[in-house]
């Protein structure tokens, strides 16, 4: 089925082009192949050697500055001093695991849980989104007694064995396993009634998984469908499907690793735009602004059921230092009103992109919420087909002119925009100007 | 088969005893249950509220100091200033992922790989030992085309779905799945020829897994069998089994998460005591002295095979900050000659424990290498049966008198000693004195 190799590799440096690379980079790339080896992908036709980060900016070794429209981990800004200080301070006092009492983890959990709907009352801290999604699968399977999972066609949920199974975008060869049902999410764009369409897809998935003998443990979705190409609207389209699903004994796992922590501008969590209450929420990337931390929020009863069968402990998860990092991120989100900024700057960015769209027929769609926006590039001379090669050209031209972005979507023709949440209007103007130039100077 | 609940829960605070706890702790424990909930185990009959760490010492909120003979993560010492400074400095400059070039990761990989035998030439960085072992399973299965795994009876290799399957000590109910063969490792103590015995166990495992249709992808072992109760000797006992296994198309995954980074005092890695060359080495806990980082080392060909089928990327793994933490740990290991210290202090500790053993028939065995030592407690009045309840008493008495340790082994009657590698003789003397008192003041 899906051969989505393009998504992961499209913006990758081709190691076979090593001899044509800039001599100053060539030796580093060679060294890289000799040390971290073949799984270690580099971005861009010619890789970037980044040495410094600050706010929305990254500097390379030649002193060139890049506007970072790509990285969603340093969500409150690269090297934010409040986070750096919080981690440094706590590392100097105590860095230990959760098997001793420490009040900070309770304060952090209280603060984080207060942003979630009431039944989601317990926080488990881990280190990566992969670990959180892996545990979510275990919880859902333990609770429902079923094994099947429904995901979207270009989903990425992480890198463990179990989570790779439910991440079609990771497969370069082969198909998702028998217990995974895949929804062709991009078809929602042509649905007359998207909510009804999504309900029907989920119902069909549950039926198929039942017929294959697995049953459906959960619908696992990134609530903004990031790697599918960013499908945010219409807000609420997930609601009928989720209501039906939960009434029929399956769970909703909302993967908030990408949309969470305010990126959509509509509050802390992407699922809230859909008026659903997940059974499990997973989170990661921006949670520690780059300090490795992640988490899972669910009802007490699900954790108790898992705990009766299998223990769970995470050595670094919820350490005193991780909690300090997480708390500092919440401080900055509040103090600098970054969710409001994501909403306002996101609206401005989207309006500017829609304005560009009205001038360039190569832009076939602009989608998104807050500071998570997808822009589709097509070939107007070929019936508006997705234009993967143009997308790659645009990404590399933008890089050449000092702006970093990436691609998403099953055909890799969606520009994926997700800058740090502290971005300001003048930086968006710079981006729009550079993007317009890149579209003008490339061809389909 | 194994019901090894004791190992994980034996030293746990019983939440049902909350009302009898010290009032100052009661409110914190209640808060904990209401926030991080049921999977969140606390150590000791009465939990510890730790507020500060330094070297081999932890301080509680009452100002009491504890000699830390338990924690193997802060392996070069709690809050070591060189690590704290390295992390703080790099966090303030650049904290980003591996898809941009950065020379530090190459220097770190070079330095780490130079401690490993030649065929192990590539390093993949992850965040946790669980992630490393999960990826090791994928590599082994991809490479061999087989699915079965051989582990020891009380093994713990991590917390993902796939790794929990191969971690019998995590199961509170039920048995390991069909594709997992378990070796009753503690029987090695009564084997006439331990190497021959281990070879026979591995051969039987391969035969069983073949008969069940899975084949054997790998023998996955912690090279000092930590959670089984620490089985270090005779050095070399793994060699014939591993030679046979590798000649017959299966791999050795050496889980160095616990013995690695010098703890055995016999070099960086536990497997070297056995004169074997693993196909995959996994590492974690002490790698960043508490900064969340982990890794996997293998041959290029295994990574290339996985990479052709499925991509692998780890958002936080190998970040510039993780690499800074890892490099600082290697600095301290060298500058403070901690592997030599582990060897010398470990020999001294073992000699003192053997001296105690000659005076107390409750001590039935002392095993280990370097600063990783297990001490079995038995009931001499009941034919030397393992004495789990006495072990719990000793652990809690030690804690009461200012020393932190834990238990291991399938019956939970092995005291598990693994202090920071910077421990000195006077601290060992204090430990021995406190242990003798604890043995005297408890009864079987």
Image (cartoon, coloured by chain):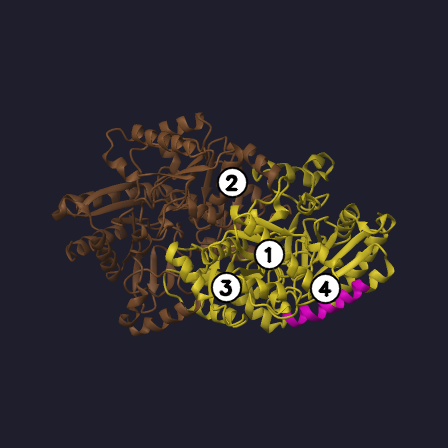
Chain colours: A yellow, B brown
The numbered mark at residue B358 is none
Q: Chain of mark 3?
A: A
Disc 3 secondary structure class: strand
> Could you say where residue A251 lies in the image, as x and y percent from the top left?
53, 60
Q: Report crowding for label 3: few under 14, some 14 to 19, many 20 or more residues within 10 A (C-alpha).
A: many
Please give left or right for residue B35 compared with residue A386 in the image.
left
Q: Are marks 2 and 4 in contact (CB under 8 Å)?
A: no
Give the labeled residue for mark 4: A193
- Reply yes or no: does residue A443 show up in magenta: no
Give the labeled residue for mark 1: B93
Disc 1 secondary structure class: helix
Q: Which residues are magenta?
A: A339-354
Give the labeled residue for mark 2: B138
Could you tell which of marks 3 and 4 lies nearer the N-terminus? Answer: 4
Does the image show residue A260? no
Give the labeled residue for mark 3: A297
């Amino acid at each position: 089925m899906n051969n989505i190799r393009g998504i992961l590799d499209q913006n990758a440096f081709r190691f076979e082009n090593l001899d044509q690379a800039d001599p100053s980079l060539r030796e580093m790339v060679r060294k890289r192949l000799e040390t971290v080896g073949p799984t270690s992908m580099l971005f861009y036709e010619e890789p970037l050697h980044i040495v410094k980060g600050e706010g929305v900016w990254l500097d390379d070794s030649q002193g060139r500055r890049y506007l970072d429209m790509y990285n969603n981990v340093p969500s409150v800004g690269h090297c934010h001093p409040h986070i750096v200080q919080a981690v440094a301070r706590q590392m100097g006092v105590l860095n230990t695991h959760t098997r001793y009492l420490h009040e900070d983890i309770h304060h952090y959990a209280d603060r984080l849980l207060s942003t979630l709907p009431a039944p989601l009352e317990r926080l488990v801290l881990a280190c990566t989104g992969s670990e959180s999604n892996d545990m979510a699968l275990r919880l859902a399977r333990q609770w429902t007694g079923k094994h099947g999972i429904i995901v979207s066609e270009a989903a990425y949920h992480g890198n463990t064995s179990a989570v790779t199974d439910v991440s079609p975008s990771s497969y370069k060869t082969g198909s998702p396993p028998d217990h995974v049902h895949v929804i062709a999410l991009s078809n929602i764009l042509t649905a007359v009634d998207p909510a009804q369409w999504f309900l029907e897809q989920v119902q069909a998935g549950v039926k198929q998984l039942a017929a294959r003998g697995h049953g459906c443990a959960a619908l696992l979705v990134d609530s903004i469908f990031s790697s599918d190409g960013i499908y945010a609207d219409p807000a609420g389209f997930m609601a009928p499907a989720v209501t039906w699903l939960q009434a029929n004994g399956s769970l909703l796992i909302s993967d908030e690793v990408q949309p969470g922590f305010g990126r959509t501008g509509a509050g802390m969590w992407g699922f809230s735009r859909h008026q659903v209450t997940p059974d499990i929420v997973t989170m990661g990337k921006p949670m520690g602004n780059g300090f490795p931390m992640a988490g899972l929020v669910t009802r007490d009863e699900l954790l108790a059921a898992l705990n009766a069968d299998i223990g769970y402990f995470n050595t670094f998860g919820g350490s005193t230092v991780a909690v300090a990092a997480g708390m500092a991120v919440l401080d900055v989100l509040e103090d600098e009103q970054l969710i409001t900024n994501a909403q306002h700057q996101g609206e401005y960015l989207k309006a500017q992109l829609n304005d560009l769209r009205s001038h360039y027929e190569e832009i076939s769609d602009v989608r998104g919420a807050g500071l998570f926006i997808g822009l589709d590039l097509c070939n107007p001379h070929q019936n508006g087909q997705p234009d993967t090669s143009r997308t790659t050209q645009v990404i590399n031209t933008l890089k050449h002119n000092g702006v970093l972005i990436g691609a998403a979507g099953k055909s890799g023709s969606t520009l994926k925009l997700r800058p740090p949440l502290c971005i300001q209007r003048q930086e968006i103007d710079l981006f729009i100007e550079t993007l317009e130039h890149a579209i003008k100077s490339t061809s389909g």
